[in-house]
Amino acid sequence: MQAIVLVGGEGTRLRPLTDTVPKPALPLVDRPFLAYMIEWLGEHGVTEAVLACGFLPDQLREALGDGEHAGVALTYVVEPDRRGTAGAIRFAAEALGERLEDRFLALNGDVLTDLDLTALQRSHAERGARATLGLYAVEDSAAFGLVDCDAAGAVLAFTEKTGRAEPGAINAGAYVLERSVLDLIPAGRQVSIETEVFPRLVGDGLCALPLDGYWMDIGTPERYLQATWDILEGRVATAVLPTAPGLFVVAGGAVAESARIGPRAVVSAGCSVGSGAEVAGSVLLADCEVGEGARVHDSVLGAGTVVAAGAEVRGAIVGAHERVGAKR
Ligand code: GTP
């Protein structure tokens, strides 16, 4: 099975972290975010992941490398300009040409999940669908559009974000598509699969299947941090080995004995934390320096950030190689 993975977005909600690193290449605990996705795809029969890149493609390639990851062959396709979620699928499909299989998966590349893609593929085949969407049930759907289905799983309608904290089934960003769906995507311009393609397939072979498991779109700072704790506290199946529940500390020797790390923290390779400093509810990406007595709470520090002795960082996203000084 082939999977086209959309990894070309600008990740504006995670700026400034995503100024220099595309969202799918951002480290999440101990590996680039996209690595989790490829590992998950490999567990569900995917043998080739086609990475549909746009924004900062070289950084993405550097993070995952050429060849394969977890037994899944990696193919990179780079769009010359922004195509949107459907336009990117069409562009990648054209780049593959005859190599594209008649049925393939398409996925948003910014979701941490262990949903059952095998069940999604089975359901698609059994119903003879043209497209099948994976659905995820949430208690609070305020930030998402909803998908309504009949009892047999045919999609009836899409509802825009209501802004209300109601339970509902949302589009999980994981699709099985027949090649014929590509005919509905106009060439050479930005096209959204959610608003321009799927609505046209309602009543014409569009199905959906609710899936159980873990699902988190890591596109905002709060959700990036929540996904980190969910990995480190075992709420999602991954291959990560936490140092302790909620903790992942690589930089053993460079953390002063009197520093307080946690509850909940990631201290990546090359970081140092000075004596009396605190790091709590926070992620330090590689090579950060937290000075003596400094406090870092509920924040993400980009690689190479320096927090001066005695300085305080709270609820912040700090871009790579920034310097945070102490108040005078
Ligand atoms: P925000 O700017 O914070 O909304 O993030 P984003 O740019 O990633 O947009 P969004 O979360 O809506 O995108 C969902 C998924 O589609 C992400 O995995 C994006 O990388 C991807 N994506 C969005 N637009 C494009 C595009 O034009 N081309 C490609 N290849 N992928 C895209």
Image (cartoon, helix red, strand yellow):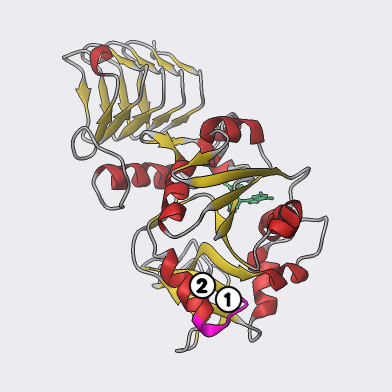
| Residue type indicated by callout 1 | Phe
Say which quarter of the image contains residue 240.
top left
Q: Residue at x 32, y 12 (%)?
A: 291
Between 117 and 141, the one nearer to me in the picture? 117
Is 189 on the left or on the right of 290, as rendered?
A: right
Task: Using the image, determine if residue 233 lies above or below residue 308.
Answer: below
Residue reaching furthest to the bottom: 151
Q: Residue at x 68, y 69 (%)?
A: 179
Between 91 and 249, the one nearer to me in the picture? 91
Q: Which residues are magenta?
A: 126-130
- Asked if residue 169 can be seen in this view, the reply is no
Q: Quadrant of the N terminus?
A: bottom right
CA–CA distance in space, label 2 to label 1: 6 Å
Q: Position of residue 6 (x, y in %)?
A: 60, 51
User: What residue does disc 1 label?
Assistant: 158
Cβ atoms at labels 2 and 1 below 8 Å apart: yes
| Residue type indicated by callout 2 | Leu
User: What residue does disc 2 label?
Assistant: 146
Is 254 on the left or on the right of 301, as rendered?
A: left
